[in-house]
Image (cartoon, rainbow, N blue to C red):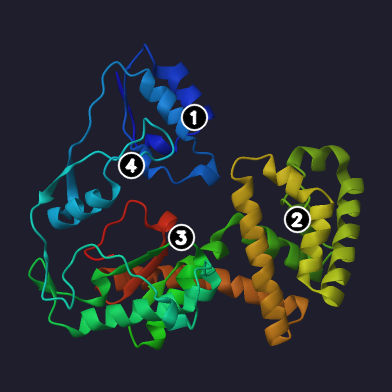
Amino acid sequence: PIVMVDEFQDTDPVQWRVIDHAFSGASTLVLIGDPKQAIYAFRGGDIHTYLSAAATAGEKQTMGTNWRSDSALVSRLQAVLRGAELGDPRIVVHDVQARHQGSRLAGAPRNDPFRLRVVPREALGRKGDKVIAIDDLRSFIGQDLAADIAALLASPATFAGDRVRAGDIAVIVEKRKDARVCFRALIDAGIPAVYTGASDVFSSGACDDWLALLEAFDQPHRSGLVRAVATTMFFGHTAETLAVQGDALTDSVAETIRQWADDARSCGVAAVFEAARLRGMADRTLSYRDGERYMTDMAHITQLLQEAAHREHLTLPALRDWLRDRREERGAGTEHNKRLDRDAAAVQVMTVHGSKGLQFPIV
């Protein structure tokens, strides 16, 4: 009788049509979401779907209390964002109250709960008013961040009465390249830190597909391995097409695998990725939901393989073993990271996508 859809702001048009046809008019349908939190456009989330669905609501309720953040932080954020229209007049930052009054941070070098750091041009030896590219700023920002966190951890700062530890702190960035720079700066400064984003790609479907192809490179005569590769995104065949076309299709795929193996030996795995693109992998993949995510992961895995092969002078079988080890290490690494999280032992570095739904004392 009651259907609740949480995080509705990340719903795509197809999902909403399914929900609408199945439940509207037949059940009490409750949509819970905040368009200001919409971050999954790359996965198909559509803010216009949220707005059109919200317009059909018979009743609307707004949560007027922030249950996570201190009032000192909320009031300062509202001073910056109050009344802002985020892409649409119907998406406005309204004032909210905070359950936690005051500030739970005390004794820090800087107790202001909300700070905007500014890089002076003189620090980079720059003059004039030309915009400085973020690539020129990245390492500076990472070092500034590490120095700021080091000063906080060296101070007698407390949060909610407990001494601030590294695990109380999260660094949230937009892109993986930003995360890697910040993570390295923290490690270089002697601050315990953990960044799991770099290993996420090793759990992706793109990693599985590359591993299947590298296995087949070593034994292209084994029809089972060849058929497994045929069903990856490199070729896009299905069990049905394999059954219908039989040995002829298997032989054709095997011949392509042999050619790609030769290309990989002479030019590197990047040549295989390009050859697969020319055979239509990108067009085929992008027609699927999450296709863009897959192609991004595929390009990332290809780059990591190319770098590893060049750096360690790996043969194709050794490269296969290297990738398999990275994937297996991810499982162990994830468990280790959870242990660090539980023991509050390290600063956690993550992208905004990875941080969704989490909360930390200090960000």
The residue nearer to you, when weighing 336 against 38, is: 38
Q: Position of residue 14 (x, y in %)?
A: 53, 28
Task: Report the Cα–Cα distance between label 1 and label 4.
Answer: 29 Å
The answer, for residue 199, to whether it is visible in the render is no
Q: Residue at x 56, y 65 (%)?
A: 202
Task: Report the Cα–Cα distance between label 4 and label 3.
Answer: 21 Å
Give the SS element for disc 1: helix
Q: Position of residue 174 (x, y in %)?
A: 46, 60
Task: Report the Cα–Cα distance between label 3 and label 2.
Answer: 34 Å
Considering only vertical position in the picture, is 41 above or below 167? above
Asked whether the beta carbons under mark 1 and mark 4 sit within 8 Å of each other, the answer is: no
The kind of residue on which mark 3 rests is Glu
The kind of residue on which mark 4 rests is Ala
Q: Earlier in the sequence, mark 1 or mark 3?
A: 1
Q: Is residue 100 left or right of residue 81?
A: left
The residue that disc 2 covers is 229
Q: Position of residue 29 (x, y in %)?
A: 33, 21
Asked whether the beta carbons under mark 1 and mark 2 sit within 8 Å of each other, the answer is: no
User: If the image is split into quadrants, where does the C terminus sit?
Assistant: bottom left
Tag of residue 84: 4
Q: Residue at x 26, y 76 (%)?
A: 166
Tag of residue 174: 3
Give the SS element for disc 2: helix
Task: Report the Cα–Cα distance between label 4 and label 2.
Answer: 50 Å
Q: Earlier in the sequence, mark 4 or mark 3?
A: 4
Tag of residue 15: 1
